[in-house]
Image: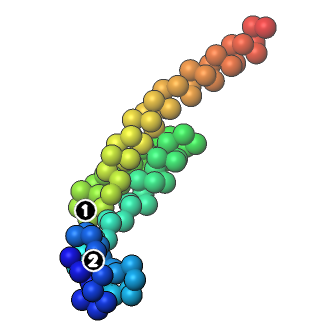
Amino acid sequence: MQCPTCGIPLAETALYCAQCGAQVGEIVDLPAPKPWNRYALWGFAGAIVAPLCGLILCIYARKQCARRGERGERLAKAGIILSICTMVIYPILIVIGIGWYVFS
């Protein structure tokens, strides 16, 4: 392939001429990425700090992601799992801590 403006040889995959800067290839626009669902982001973050709030946000986020076609459905699913695990582990750690304090 040659540059139509200055005539120097170019690679077949070139988009612009290195010598004169003329456009020689077709530029393909990529589609804009889908936005992240904010409830999924906040729900995942809240799964550690306030697991019940994180669980509620993640359940709502999964429904919204399916309805709106946004990204974050897997993040919301991970947040649901993390929220449930945190709600199970926190009371156990509290009981162990109280027992350690009382019996030592």
Q: Is residue 37 visible?
A: yes
Mark 1 is surrounded, within 10 Å at the Cα level, by few (under 14), some (14 to 19) or many (20 or more) other residues, namely some
Residue at position x 44%, y 36% in the image: 82
Are the residues at dot 1 and dot 2 in contact (C-beta closer than 8 Å)? Answer: no
Colouring = rainbow
So how many labels did they put on this image?
2
Q: Is residue 51 above or below residue 25?
A: above
Residue at position x 20%, y 76% in the image: 1
Marks 1 and 2, how far apart at CA: 45 Å
Q: Amino acid at mark 2?
A: Pro
Where, by quadrant of the figure, is residue 66 drawn? Answer: bottom left
| Image position, residue 80 (x, y; %) | 39, 40
| Image position, residue 71 (x, y; %) | 33, 57
Q: Residue furthest front?
A: 8
Mark 2 is surrounded, within 10 Å at the Cα level, by few (under 14), some (14 to 19) or many (20 or more) other residues, namely few
Q: Earlier in the sequence, mark 1 or mark 2?
A: 2
Q: Nearer the viewer, residue 26 or 24?
A: 24
| Image position, residue 12 (x, y; %) | 22, 70
Find numbered disc 1 in the image and state the secondary structure of the residue it sits on.
Answer: loop
Q: Is residue 25 above or below residue 66?
A: below
Residue at position x 55%, y 43% in the image: 50
Looking at the rendering, in which quadrant would you find the C terminus? top right
Q: Is residue 68 above or below residue 58?
A: below
Residue 95 marker: none
Q: Residue furthest right?
A: 104
Q: Amino acid at mark 1?
A: Gly
Where, by quadrant of the figure, is residue 90 drawn? Answer: top right
Residue 69 marker: 1
| Image position, residue 16 (x, y; %) | 33, 80
Residue at position x 29%, y 58% in the image: 65
> Mark 2 = which residue?
9
